Image: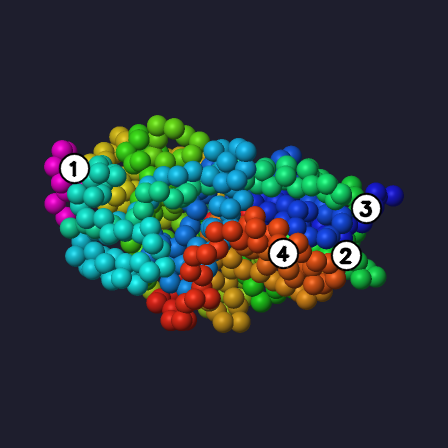
Amino acid sequence: MPNTSQYDLLIIGGGVTGSALLYLAARYSSIEHVGLIEKYAAPARVNSLSSNNSQTLHRGDIETNYSLEKALKVQRAACMLESYASTQADAHHIIFKYPKMVLAVGKQECAQLRARFEIFKQYYPKLRILEKKDIAKIEPEVAMKHGSFRDDEIVALGSTDEYSAVNFEALSRSFVRQAGLVENKRVKVHYNEEVLHITIEDNLFKIESRHTCYQARSLVVCAGGHSLKLAHDLGYGLHYSCLPIAGSYYFTPHVLNGKVYTVQNDALPFAAIHGDPDVLVPGKTRFGPTALVLPILERYNLSTLPDFFRVFRFDRKVGRALWDLLKVSDIRNYMLKNILFEIPLIRTLLFLKDARKIVPSLKLGDLSFARHVGGIRPQLIDKNNGKLLMGEAKIDTGIGAIFNMTPSPGGTSCVENAEIDLRIIIKYLGASIDETAFKHDILRQDKQHSSADYPGRVLKNDAAT
Ligand SMILES: Cc1cc2nc3c(=O)[nH]c(=O)nc-3n(C[C@H](O)[C@H](O)[C@H](O)COP(=O)(O)OP(=O)(O)OC[C@H]3O[C@@H](n4cnc5c(N)ncnc54)[C@H](O)[C@@H]3O)c2cc1C
């Protein structure tokens, strides 16, 4: 007979999304019995692993692939994460201050960035226009080439005194640790348990792993691309297909002091590459990520291939959405280039051209492919509208079960996303939130502009990072 334990709220997946919800539920809600099931032996072994993402605390100011509306939403999420992380005793292992900027190269990009600044400056008081000589003071390797200023026209938008990087793995561990310390709550984390199947019986969710059958009054699945598989299992989200986009990186010796993003090509659905320090690899600079479609749900884990086919659910509508993407020559060429980025020998040569946009003096010998670095963004295709969706997606069943799919900026949004889920679950269970404590601890920096202040004009489509 399998063991049985019953929870008020059970979370599946111990990445940064699931662990943030575990903490918020334990610390700020009246929910009594909260559990988390994670298939690996520790939190954050998949996309939230420190080496599997770009470690950027996105605020929207330097991400030219974000519309103002999206930027302000992300800014609020970033402030919530910062409120938690910066007040922890081990904050210096979790959240980091680096200078950051988005660099425009050439007349057209420079004009575009200056125009963006005029719109964004009122919402981002720390954002500055950086001319060539200002850039040189922060990032000499960006503004100079072999000792003199580079020839091409450049300008940047950036700031120097803000938290801009996060170790999402350390953040996940912190959430789990802090959730376990909350008094008068039953918080239990089950590692090495893979959820295989979910059913509903007598108004309870039955969550089956190989050895155990858990019962829960409510359920939030934060299992990346696997969330969609579990949702399909229950008959939800059948109009979604998942397109996994892997991101790879390249290391160079230390050439950048902070994060340097580049201006987005509006025709592309994925963000242009950037360069930055890796919070756990001192003395190096990391460039990327690339964007390669791969038929697996976890990078470097071929056993997730069958799961990919379960969530891909190829049919005429998926075919049409993909065809619409491939019809655009910029996207077609970009996808081809990203395939070539994975082929040994030629990949470094090709990538060098893109990286030189940021650091013009880079040499071929400076670049090395970062092995086993970079995760997979589970981008969704909305089959009803034939569109590739950017950013996070959520399926709220309305019956106490939520499924989260979290490509970038899912790391940055983890606390905001947890708040959204918690409010839905609280309502469903008839529980409550300690609003005063939540506002004091988590929303304390929420004095900045939010998307609610924004009149609603979307500048352009958002692209995934
Ligand atoms: C290349 C790349 C760059 C990125 N850069 C950034 C960035 O700079 N900034 C940013 O904010 N975001 C970034 N992201 C996105 C960010 O990494 C993710 O949004 C975030 O880590 C998602 O966290 P998660 O907890 O939802 O998923 P994950 O971290 O993938 O965690 C899912 C968890 O669920 C578990 N799980 C899966 N299936 C089961 C099951 N059946 N049973 C039990 N457990 C299960 C997994 O083991 C895993 O621990 C990037 C992503 C990629 C791939």
Residue assigned mark 1: 145
User: Would you say the residues marked 2 and 1 are in contact, meaning their CB atoms lie under 8 Å apart?
Assistant: no
User: 10 Å neighbourhood of mark 2: few (<14), some, or many (≥20)?
Assistant: many
Q: Nearer the viewer, residue 437 or 226?
A: 437
Say which element carries label 1: strand
Question: Which amino acid, mark 3?
Answer: Ser
Left or right side of 278 for 18: right
Asked if ligand 1 lies within 8 A of label 3, the reply is no
User: 10 Å neighbourhood of mark 3: few (<14), some, or many (≥20)?
Assistant: few
Q: Is residue 171 visible?
A: yes
User: Would you say the residues marked 2 and 3 are in contact, meaning their CB atoms lie under 8 Å apart?
Assistant: no
Residue assigned mark 2: 217
**Above or below, 455 relative to 158:** below
Question: Which amino acid, mark 4?
Answer: Glu
Q: Nearer the viewer, residue 342 or 183?
A: 183
Residue assigned mark 3: 5
Residue assigned mark 4: 435
* Cα gap from disc 2 to disc 4, whole angstroms: 23 Å
**Above or below, 296 relative to 331:** above
| Image position, residue 172 (x, y; %) | 57, 41
- Report the magenta residues as a range: 143-152
Q: Residue at x 60, y 41 (%)?
A: 175
